[in-house]
Image (cartoon, rainbow, N blue to C red):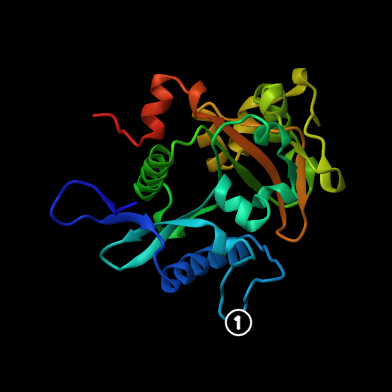
Amino acid sequence: MTSATMPGPEPEFTVRLAQSDADLRAAQTLRYDVFVRELGGGGPLVDHESQLERDRFDPYFDHLLVFHEPTSQVVGVYRLMRADQAVKAGQFYSESEYDLGPLRSSGRRLLELGRSCLHRDFRGGVAMFHLWTGLARYVETHGIDILFGVASFHGTDAQKLAQPLAMLNHAHLAPPELRVRARADHFQRMDLVAPGDLDRRRAMIEMPALIKAYLRLGGFVGQGAYLDHAFNTTDVCLVLDTARMNARQRRIYAGERAG
């Protein structure tokens, strides 16, 4: 995958896959800033001295990076793992949290997404547009059919997340043939609020932006949430079937902007 730039003589952002140890360290540095410093996450391989958020799966993923050209700074990252890479790693990352049997038995080409984050100074702007555009090009290049991965709510108190979790369960549960299920050891029911008591406005306000973005693309969630105490998150598994996306959703996913 080559760099992607916006038209113009001085592009502000470029997107490409990590090509060196220095690129990977830049991604891990941003991840440390977001997932450890901001959100209080952790893990056995996190390097607090060097301020790197890392794990044993990093060598097997492709790492999609967004560079801010004026500062040469990595401001956005995505981890991408195809099925052939998962074989080398021994499993997909999210298989530690979810039974992926329905996806594995589908016979379709899978891509796991993870560790998506943006530098705090570049959220709500065009950096995310570039990250999505790079992802869409990667999916097209590799002929991917289904994208999936865990996305997180901050904290592990499910009662505080009852409204958005219930909305996901009642309105966005994956169809049976794609319905992965959270592992029993950390399984958390999501139907914590009855459909008649659901406050949809509050649920959407409390929904993380990344999850809302996948829902706009027609994404689903698996059965149950997973309480990740080490990372201080409540995780849901998002599944996006590219064949089910309508024309408008495809335009959004491909990074096309109106006007």
Residue 62 % position (x, y): 48, 56
Q: Is residue 63 left or right of residue 193?
A: left
Q: Is residue 212 left or right of residue 189?
A: left
Query: Under tag 1, what secondary structure?
Result: loop
Instruction: Determine which quarter of the picture holds residue 66.
Output: bottom left
Q: Front-most of 176 and 167?
A: 176
Instruction: Determine which quarter of the picture holds residue 251.
Output: top left
Work out whether 173 lies above or below 92.
above
Could one spot residue 85 in this view of the protein? yes
* Residue to which mark 1 is pinned: 49
Q: Front-most of 172 and 122?
A: 172
Extreme residue in the left direction: 9
Q: Is residue 257 left or right of residue 249?
A: left
Q: Residue at x 60, y 32 (%)?
A: 204
Extreme residue in the bottom direction: 49
- Screen quadrant of the C terminus: top left
Could one spot residue 160 in this view of the protein? no
User: Disc 1 residue type?
Assistant: Glu
Q: Residue at x 29, y 54 (%)?
A: 3
